[in-house]
Amino acid sequence: MVYIDEDGRIAWFVPILIGAAFGAYSGYQIGKAKGAEGLSMFGYVFGGAVIGGFAGYAGNAVAATGGAFSQTGGIIVGSYYNSVGMTVLSGGLVEPSVSFGAFSYDFGSGSFGYLGKPRNSALENVGYTFGAMANLSDLIAWDNGTEVELVTRHKDAGDGGKYRHSALVNEEEGINISVAPSENRQRISELLKDQDAIVGDNYADLSNSSRVTIRNVNKSILQNYPGNGGELPGGSSLPANWNLLCKNCSQHITWALWKAGVPTLPLVFPSLLHYQLLLRQYGIWTSPFLYNIRQH
């Protein structure tokens, strides 16, 4: 389920709900292993939900600080709190561990887990994959990271406009990748041809737009991307081209994010870019719980 607040952003409590859901499942598995029933089982499920919810909150709080390797730090903190909590809840049945994103360490066995390790479950590899995504953007950002917001204007936004649009925005850092065509062409054959690009409306003030926050990406790479309008007024020329098939607004953002360590598929429709990055963020939030889900 996707919880969106009135500004079109993911609601602040979503990481807590994700952690609580995984925690409740882990609590149930612990209770089942101990033969618990009735109120005793409820205690394990409720205790697991509290532990997972707190781990989700703590991990997200660290990731939101925006410092060097903050996303990786969030995974470390969230996974450690969750694992230690489950160790206590299970009376030692669950061994404590910690995830670093693409790999993890089990304190009980002294062994490492990692993406693609033989005998990993599909869910474990999914957790490591999203953890690796956080590691990659952290690594490329190093100590030069910033937070940007993908703003997506949908066709039914209610502002009288006819077109969907994507923009990548952090106005305080001079990032405004909102690429639009310089000419109002109508025929498909003409739209497929390169034309000069200009700074389009980023719809940052449109209340009906959808938003996804992308944390800790290299700001210099985005600032220097040819499609970045920075502080230029709308309609200003950009040193970039536009065409509908591979250089439209969402694809310019895709190429910029690839350079900044955030891989996305170069799809034509802005809404598909939105859902890709929404899935990425949800995946990073689940990573501290998925990597060792089989142990529970």
Image (cartoon, rainbow, N blue to C red):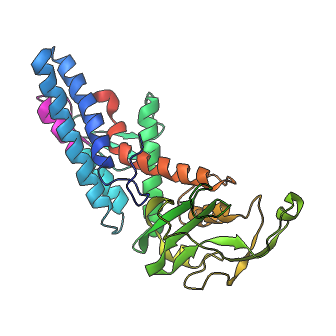
Tell me the quadrant of the picture where the N terminus can be found: top left
Residue 107 x, y percent position in the rendering: 22, 40
Judging depth in this view, the residue of 105 and 249 nearest the camera is: 249
Q: Is residue 126 above or below residue 155?
A: above
Q: Residue furthest right?
A: 189
* Relative horizontal placement of residue 16, taking residue 89 as reference (left or right): right
* Relative horizontal placement of residue 65, taking residue 241 as reference (left or right): left
How many marks overall? 0
Residue 133 is covered by the magenta coloring: no
Residue drawn at 83 percent across, 68 percent down? 185
Q: Quadrant of residue 163?
A: bottom right
Residue drawn at 18 percent across, 21 percent down? 31
Judging depth in this view, the residue of 81 and 187 nearest the camera is: 187
Residue 250 x, y percent position in the rendering: 64, 61
Residue 83 is covered by the magenta coloring: yes
Q: Is residue 214 above or below residue 107?
A: below
Q: Quadrant of residue 157?
A: bottom right
Q: Is residue 213 visible?
A: yes
Q: Quadrant of residue 156?
A: bottom right
Judging depth in this view, the residue of 21 and 139 nearest the camera is: 21
Tell me the quadrant of the picture where the C terminus can be found: top left
Residue 219 x, y percent position in the rendering: 48, 74
Residue drawn at 47 percent across, 52 percent down? 133
Residue drawn at 59 percent across, 86 percent down? 232
Judging depth in this view, the residue of 59 and 162 nearest the camera is: 162
Q: Which region of the structure is painted magenta?
A: 81-97
